[in-house]
Amino acid sequence: MKIAVTGKGGVGKTTFAATLARLYADEGKKVLAADVDPDANLGLALGFDEETLDSIVPISKMRKLIEERTGANSQNQFYKLNPKVDDIPDTYGKTCNGVKLLVLGTVETGGGGCVCPEHVMLKRVINNLVIHRDDVVIMDMEAGLEHLGRGTTESMDEFIVVIEPGARSVQTYKNVKRLAKDLGVSQVKVVANKVRNPEDEEFIRSKIPAEDLLGMIHYNTEVIDADRQGKSPYDFSETVTAEIRKIKDKIDQNSIL
């Protein structure tokens, strides 16, 4: 199972991605959670302590590693397009609650000069996670899909856009669906989060095609409490975990069909 979770900042995609990863881990599956969001906080949502997370350097920031693997440096502008990356998840990943976390990070393009080696490195790592590993892989993405290429997306089981009841969030879903189509992916699913009342539910159903809607997660202050304490929402809210478990069951069913 290979799942990319995306959505606007603040919609709760990290809560969803982390809880989904914990659910698969509880089934005894090998789970790798990849944080590809510039505001990397998947580790806290998985239950890692802050000291461990502070020690993690995103792969995109490991300049020496990138130079070694791609051959690119200040003297050499030529670099490998297929650097060795298959050892990176096991070498640099950290494990907590049965989930291996790999923080990939993103590449800052503003005024950063040539960023091609970093992009190549990230794309190769993601390609390796999706195509060559037998783990359940859950990627916490930013709203764009620029790290994904056609060869990678063809091997994805699910593109899941987490939205909240609002026009801007629905627009993000439409943008992701358009980007995914450009990459040859037609199946983009939706999870609605922070749903407060029947009006919110009706809004979601009126904007999202029924075949694209995996389910809804209702607004819950226990998730806020978990975040305030830097804990995993999986350990704080049985209600939210149960709602995400139903969504997971639907994901599993879709993968079998």
Image (tube, helix red, strand yellow):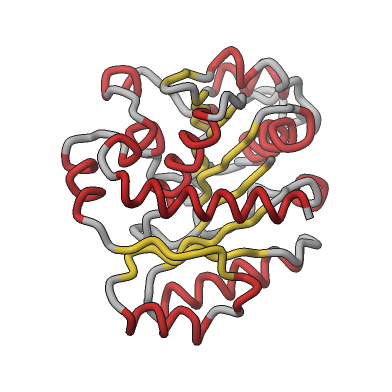
Identify the image quadrant of the N terminus.
Answer: top right
Q: Position of residue 148 (x, y in %)?
A: 69, 49
Q: Nearer the viewer, residue 85 or 161?
A: 161
> Which residue is drawn at the image coordinates 64% and 21% (left, top)?
67
Q: Which quarter of the figure has residue 194? A: bottom left
Looking at the rendered structure, the number of numbered marks drawn on it comes to 0
85 vs 48, left or right, is: right
Can I make out residue 80 in this image?
Answer: no
Identify the image quadrant of the C terminus.
Answer: bottom right
**For the view shown, which residue lies furthest in the top direction?**
91
171 vs 203, left or right, is: right
Relative to 188, say whether 130 is above or below: above
Q: Position of residue 75 (x, y in %)?
A: 67, 22
> Which residue is drawn at the image coordinates 50% and 53% (left, top)?
246
Q: Nearer the viewer, residue 219 or 227?
A: 219
Relative to 71, say whether 194 is above or below: below
